[in-house]
């Protein structure tokens, strides 16, 4: 029995429900009368940003908009958003969008009141940027986050991801990145096209499953993880097949929030680390890269966490299986089958990655992205990892275990 001390982090206020965006103005005006919305041009075009602006105007909150965010945002976007926030001096930052926009909003809110550039706060990048990240000294601007996808859970986490010279990297996690108000409106996510629905949904599944596999999983995080796994298994196929299925959208938003809370407190392990070794270089959406890696990371860990994988299977509604080992294998097969049902790739080969790239991906995993998997239950070692990559390239799962 372990009596270790458990830390639990959460946002100060979560507003969840259909049309919750209408609450934005009332929540915002407690911080002042002048807001900077950080978002992207697509969300402006489809009218999502208008909904936020309408609610703010009703509450007499003046609005400026920074709409230059992009998927997997580059460092340049972070620097530009920070410059705009410093120049305009808003009383609050409101992030509207998927994980990328929300991550840029978190960093902008922090850097509007702190010195230095965004790059100063990123974890050291081996061979490129060896210095330790600066510490945020001053309190950030008030921060409201409004997710428009159901996946990243960024609205309830203390993490932010950045692309630097073609590779994914992380800002040093910070409680200042936890927002003051997360406003989760499943109606906003209901405009996602099928591909975005599945890639963001599988990202959430990966957060939840990795948070179970992690050695840091604890009595506070596990209920969030397992509930997310249950809801995603029940509703992601429905949200994919029929985007107007509002019940499915509602529960997928709930699932992403649950998974985000688990992610915030436990972090990820091997699947996200593997995904980082090829996603940015090949411009593969984050959730798609996590989906490719997830069943292989589960299989890699299987010898040490059969009981945990069996629990994941139970949450997914998998029946039968006999002993723990076979139940664990059924859970891995259930994840793999879910990916297939959603029309997602399940091998590196399918997304156009060459077999000759395996050595450099392994080198990245073992030297650059090590900070992502200190809590992976099985030690990450070159030989078994090479075997994992070779099978992941071909799409061979559950053959020898
Ligand atoms: Fe993720």
Image (cartoon, grey):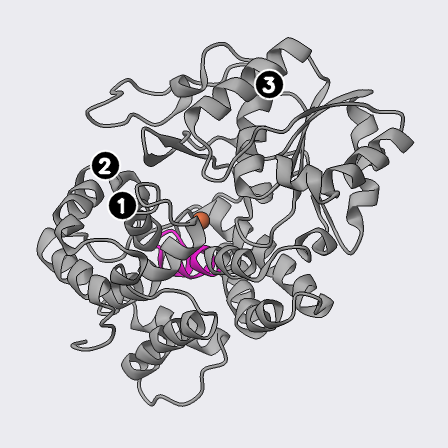
Image spot of residue 181 (x, y percent)? 70, 37
Q: Can residue 30 be seen in this snapshot? A: yes
Q: Nearer the viewer, mark 1 or mark 3?
A: 1
For disc 2, the marked residue is 368
Q: Main secondary structure of the magenta part?
A: helix
Along the horizontal axis of the image, is 376 left or right of 69? left
What is the secondary structure assignment of the residue under circle 2? loop
Between disc 1 and disc 3, whose residue precedes? 3
Q: Residue at x 44, y 69 (%)?
A: 343
Q: Give the range drawn in magenta.
A: 205-218
Image spot of residue 312 (x, y percent)? 43, 71
Q: Is 261 colored magenta in this rendering?
A: no
Q: Which residue is drawn at 31% across and 49% down?
A: 375
For disc 3, the marked residue is 139
Compared with residue 382, is residue 154 higher up or lower down, i.e. above or below?
above
Q: Residues within 10 Å of mark 1 (few under 14, many from 20)?
A: many
| Contact between labelled residues 2 and 1, with CB atoms less than 8 Å apart | yes
């Amino acid at each position: 029995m372990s009596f270790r001390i458990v830390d639990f982090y959460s946002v100060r206020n979560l507003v969840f429900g259909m049309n919750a965006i209408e609450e934005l103005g009332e929540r915002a005006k407690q911080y002042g009368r002048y807001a900077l919305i950080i978002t992207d041009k697509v969300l402006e075009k489809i009218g999502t940003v208008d909904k936020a602006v309408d609610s703010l105007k009703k509450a007499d909150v003046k609005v400026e908009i920074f709409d230059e965010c992009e998927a997997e945002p580059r460092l340049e976007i972070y620097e530009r958003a920070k410059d705009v926030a410093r120049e305009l001096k808003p009383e609050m930052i409101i992030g509207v969008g998927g994980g990328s926009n929300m991550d840029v909003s978190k960093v902008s809110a922090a850097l509007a009141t702190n010195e230095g550039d965004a790059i100063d706060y990123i974890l050291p990048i081996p061979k490129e940027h060896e210095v330790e990240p600066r510490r945020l000294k001053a309190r950030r601007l008030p921060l409201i986050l409004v997710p428009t996808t159901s996946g990243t859970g960024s609205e309830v986490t203390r993490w932010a991801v950045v692309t630097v010279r073609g590779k994914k990297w992380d800002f040093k996690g910070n409680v200042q990145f936890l927002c003051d108000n997360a406003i989760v409106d499943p109606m906003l996510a209901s405009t996602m096209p099928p591909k975005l629905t599945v890639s963001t949904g599988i990202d959430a599944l990966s957060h939840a499953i990795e948070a179970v596999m992690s050695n840091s999983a604890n009595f506070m995080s596990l209920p969030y993880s397992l509930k997310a796994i249950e809801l995603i298994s029940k509703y992601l196929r429905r949200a994919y097949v029929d985007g107007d299925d509002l019940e499915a959208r509602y529960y997928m938003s709930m699932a992403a929030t649950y998974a985000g809370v688990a992610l915030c407190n436990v972090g990820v392990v091997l699947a996200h680390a593997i995904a980082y070794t090829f996603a940015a270089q090949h411009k593969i959406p984050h959730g798609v890269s996590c989906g490719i890696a997830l069943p292989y990371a589960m299989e890699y860990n299987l010898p040490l966490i059969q009981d945990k994988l069996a629990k994941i299977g139970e949450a997914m509604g998998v029946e039968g299986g006999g002993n723990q080992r076979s139940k664990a294998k059924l859970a891995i097969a259930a994840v793999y089958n879910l990916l297939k049902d959603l029309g997602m790739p399940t091998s590196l080969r399918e997304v156009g990655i060459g077999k000759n790239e395996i050595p450099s991906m392994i080198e990245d995993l073992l030297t650059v992205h090590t900070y992502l998997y200190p809590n992976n239950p099985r030690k990450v070692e070159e030989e078994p990892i090479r075997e994992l990559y070779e099978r992941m390239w071909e799409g061979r799962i559950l053959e020898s275990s």
